[in-house]
Image (tube, coloured by chain):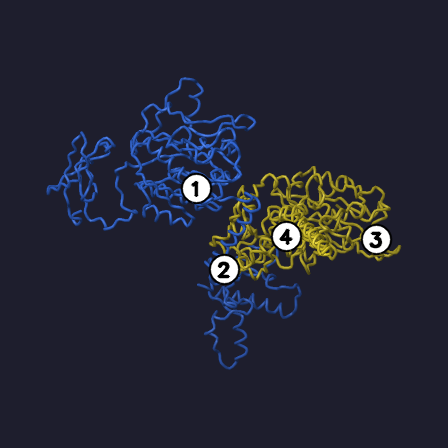
Amino acid sequence: MKQLTALQQQGRRSNSFRGASSPLDAGVDDSIRSPTTIFWLVLHGLCCLISLVLGFRFSRIVFFLLFSTASSPSTTTISGATSPPERNISGVGGGSRVVVGRHGILIRPWPHPDPAEVMKAHKIIERVQLEQRSQYGVKGPRTLIAVTPTYVRTFQTLHLTGLMHSLMNVPYDVIWVVVEAGGHTNETASLISKSGLRTIHIGFDTKMPVLWEDRHKLESKMRLHALRVVREKRLDGIVMFADDSNMHALELFDEIQKVKWVGAVSVGILAHSGGSEEGELPVIQRDDSKKDDKDPQLPVQGPACNSSNHLVGWHTFDSLLFLEKSARYIGDRAVVLPRKLEWAGFVLNSRLVWEDADKPGWVKEFEEVGRDGEDVESPLSFLNDASVVEPLGSCGRKVMLWWLRVEARADSKFPARWIIDPPLEITVPAKRTPWPDAPPELPSSVEKVISIQETTDKRASKSGSRRKRSSRSKRKHTAKVIDEHVSTRHSADN
Amino acid sequence: MRNRRWVFAVLLFLALCLRIEAFKFHRTQRTERISGSAGDVLEDDPVGRLKVFVYELPSKYNKKILQKDPRCLTHMFAAEIYMHRFLLSSAVRTLNPEEADWFYTPVYTTCDLTPNGLPLPFKSPRMMRSAIQLISSNWPYWNRTEGADHFFIVPHDFGACFHYQEEKAIERGILPLLQRATLVQTFGQRNHVCLKDGSITIPPYAPPQKMQAHLIPPSTPRSIFVYFRGLFYDVGNDPEGGYYARGARASVWENFKDNPLFDISTEHPTTYYEDMQRAVFCLCPLGWAPWSPRLVEAVIFGCIPVIIADDIVLPFADAIPWEEIGVFVAEKDVPKLDTILTSIPIEEILRKQRLLANPSMKQAMLFPQPAQPGDAFHQILNGLARKLPHDASVYLKPGEKALNWTAGPVGDLKPW
């Protein structure tokens, strides 16, 4: 087999070479024709013919052996095993060499990537990119101080992980100030410690309320508290308000490095309703033709500029556009609306909140703001004169930040730290689900009753599917009576 | 006490001066100048250092050929045409041949193109011969030196050997009539028949506007480690490999085709120039001839060229320190290419990138229209100026003949 293919290779090469030189020429490096070379060429041709006839490769070396050992005719053992010296297919110094043409193709014995080399290359690339950034990117980057109010709830892990990964990818120094409503908990602490960033975890001893309105107010208070910490510790850098459910593009972090004192960016508002059945946002249909041509636009909050790129006003959020009532409590199915101007759209130089620092005249003293417990709606309350705000992101035309509030109901359960321990072994079917049809307990209603009902009869749920549920569940008594039959079953029966 | 104060004042003054120097260094664009003879030579101005006389040849040698096939203006051998145009309007041109140091013959030998756009060299020797016969009979300057103070631009594959196949080119050798002239060519390989001593190696033509149009912001991070686009096996002429590129390109493919660091393929992406700007290293292996336009592209786009061509002579080698800018890999070391590239110390890589960022380096590789100071036209003239003054042996005594007008293959002697 091998010999036949070798023969075929020889034949094919003679046709394939561009131009006229014959394969025999290829074997000869110089064009000098000495008698011995001619002799060998003739012998080679003869061997080719013999091989063609015999069907296996007939090597020229055979002649050497024939003539050298004239007494012992032991030729049959050498059929094609040896090869002429210049066609050495065995390994040369541990490497392999595919012999084709005149030069051959050098292939190393293990032609696959070496992980150590790949790591070294990645380090080189990282260093090159660092150099590029220091040359062409932002000069003299300042530390980013990200202020995040958070609290323990079902979607906290989802939101904080997203924010954490965005902050981990920022190429500058980051100090992450996390203010937690309901006090300092291990749940949040373990989550943010995975980031590897410098974090300041502050507990704020008020539980997060269920109504959105109250939640916004508490968040403002928490942010003020964080600014107080910035002031006390004299942290130097750029303060940005990174809410845990917002989405940040990485260009945002490069853009806010340009701020001198106070800057504003445009925030895309993803006001969305909790119910997934509706396709579009319920927006008031306008009658003028302008609106019909365009698709419903994403509402954007941020600075408004005139043609010479000076700040002239603000695009704020107009709640009147929304038909249905907005969500009142966390987890409500209606549309969750932001306030007029969100904190997230502003960035501050941290020196503005310091005690004695060179501050421009138009900023109020930090202690004066929010002193009497009044609601600080946006950082504009820090300023005497709102026109000093610098519009960023090509004067607000570039949206690099999206506001989104997606939350589960306040009473929804989730396993602590998202570790299921002990492992689930009980599956409990329900006749029909108690919620989300039933509204949750609002601050007005008081009683909570914990009850466990067990019946031995098996009941399928309304939609025919089984719901896995732990055997203990919190129930609320509301005006509506909820009927539920819960039966415990062995996991083996499933 | 007084003395001390004086000393202190002087020291302060010196410190200020030195710091100002340091500031100046910092403020520059973090590119490095190759100091010393090599680097400064790039910025020499040839005007005033030499005079060139351009022969007026009938238009059948230049304009008519170009009219027949305007593709000659955009392929990689277009340097001969643009050099002619540059010289016609340049300050080094003189209309008085008596005071000229160099004589230029505008004959476009590389403009006979196949339908694919590749030049056929079969008529070029006859064309060149016919041009030389014309200038030797109409002007006395050729016979005075038998061409030793004349220069010709022969940008084709193997220069004045006038063939695209290496064996045939070596067989033919340099055209006998050009034995004494200075050749300006893209081909350069040491110890090769087709590279004459004293030739000037130039880069192949790459369209400057096209490359400018594809520039991306320099802050785009370089995320590709090694980049290459081109053939590994010349399927039409050498499908098995082993002849094309002396097996080096096939070796690159076989060893690194599944290596994530090597972005190599035979595709023709539209983002070729943009991708080069996102790469740290760009491979410039030999093909049928050792030179390639990839070198020019790599220098323009700041990608460190990895030159895999044994004994190659790179363009303007006496003005550009290629060893400091690029990485040279022997063809037998290709299987170890990843080890070689990752073991280069990072400071060296950063230094090479700084050298490449030098605008005079990029300018020296281009043939812009209209010509700009420091570009390839000027580097050619600088090279010619460096060869002045002509040695006395250049001038032949009357009646002395150095060239053999009947040498060469019989086919060359036919009139064109």
**What whole-number distance in Å separates the C-alpha atoms at marks 3 and 1?**
79 Å
Q: Nearer the viewer, residue B20 or B327?
A: B20
Helix, strand or loop for disc 1: strand
Residue A146 bears which disc, if any? 1
User: Which mark is nearer the camera, 2 or 1?
Assistant: 1
- Whole-number angstrom distance, CA of label 3 to CA of label 4: 31 Å
Residue A70 in view (yes/no): yes
Q: Amino acid at mark 1?
A: Ala
On the picture, is B110 further left or further right than B343? right
Q: Position of residue B111 (x, y in %)?
A: 68, 43
Q: Assign the N terminus of chain A to one quadrant of the image.
A: bottom left
Q: Is residue B175 above or below residue A479?
A: below
Tell me if residue B364 comes above or below residue A49 in the rendering. Answer: above
| Residue under pointer 2 | A8
Same chain for the residues at labels 3 and 2, yes or no?
A: no
Q: Nearer the viewer, mark 3 or mark 2?
A: 3
The circle on residue B41 is none
- Colour of chain B, in one word, is yellow
Instruction: Give a yes or no on whether discs 2 and 1 share a subunit.
Output: yes
Task: Please tell me whether mark 2 sits on a helix, a strand or a loop.
Answer: helix
Which amino acid type is marked by label 3? Thr
Badge 3 is on which residue?
B145
**Is label 2 in contact with label 1 (beta carbons under 8 Å)?**
no
Query: Which quadrant of the structure image shows residue B366?
Result: top right
The residue depicted at 47 percent of the width and 52 percent of the height is B260
